[in-house]
């Protein structure tokens, strides 16, 4: 299992931060590992939203279908994708913080079957990918990364 967990303090009100994060089309604006995002169901974030997220993998683009499996506005959204080789679960929570909010992004990748032996390598690679993405997320949210 590979996990990337980050907390970002933003001046955005919780409802605005939640709306931005729940609309996975925005991933393409802040995550340099995402080539493009096409919404295939719904319009923006929502309980029935689904997105095809094309990610860069070893010089090529691979598309994963993310379905919204939990949508509890304005606090929690969970998107889940599954391919023949892995599962991906992205949990986004938003908590009030003064006049702004704290966005927590918790992404978990798991390789399936015998590929699971490569999880430690995936974890190291995912950490580097996450570090690049969080810089874009901090900019998009006009915020700062926090520890905790």
Image: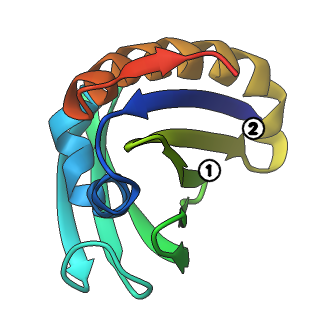
Q: Tag 1, which secondary structure?
A: loop
The residue closer to the viewer here, 117 or 23, is 23
Query: Mark 1 = which residue?
Result: 85
Quarter occupied by the C terminus: top right
On residue 54, the disc is none
The residue at the far front in this view is: 98
Q: Which mark is residue 115?
A: 2
Q: Position of residue 4 (x, y in %)?
A: 61, 29
Q: How far, Cα to Cα, is label 2 from label 1?
A: 7 Å
Task: Tell me the SS state at disc 2.
Answer: helix
- Observer able to see residue 59: no
Q: Is residue 139 left or right of residue 45?
A: left
Query: Disc 2 or 1, which lies upstream in sequence?
Result: 1
Residue 100's x, y, as percent? 38, 42
**Residues at discs 2 and 1 in contact (Cβ within 8 Å):** yes
Residue 78: % across, % down: 56, 64
At 44% from the left and 85% from the top, the residue drawn is 47
Is residue 126 placed above or below 52 in the rendered structure? above
Quarter of the image that includes the N terminus: top right
């Amino acid at each position: 299992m590979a996990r990337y967990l980050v907390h970002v303090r933003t001046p955005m009100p919780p409802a605005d931060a939640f709306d931005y994060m729940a609309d996975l089309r925005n991933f393409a604006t802040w995550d340099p590992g995402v080539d493009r995002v096409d919404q295939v169901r719904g319009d923006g974030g929502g309980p029935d939203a689904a997105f095809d997220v094309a990610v860069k993998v070893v010089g090529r683009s691979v598309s994963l279908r993310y379905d919204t499996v939990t949508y509890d506005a304005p606090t929690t959204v969970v998107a889940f994708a599954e391919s023949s080789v892995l599962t991906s679960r992205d949990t986004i929570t938003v908590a009030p913080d003064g006049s702004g909010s704290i966005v927590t992004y918790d992404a978990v990748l798991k390789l399936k079957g015998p590929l699971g032996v490569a999880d430690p390598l995936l974890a190291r690679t995912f950490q580097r990918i996450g570090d690049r993405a969080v810089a874009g997320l901090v900019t998009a949210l006009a915020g700062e990364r926090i520890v905790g």
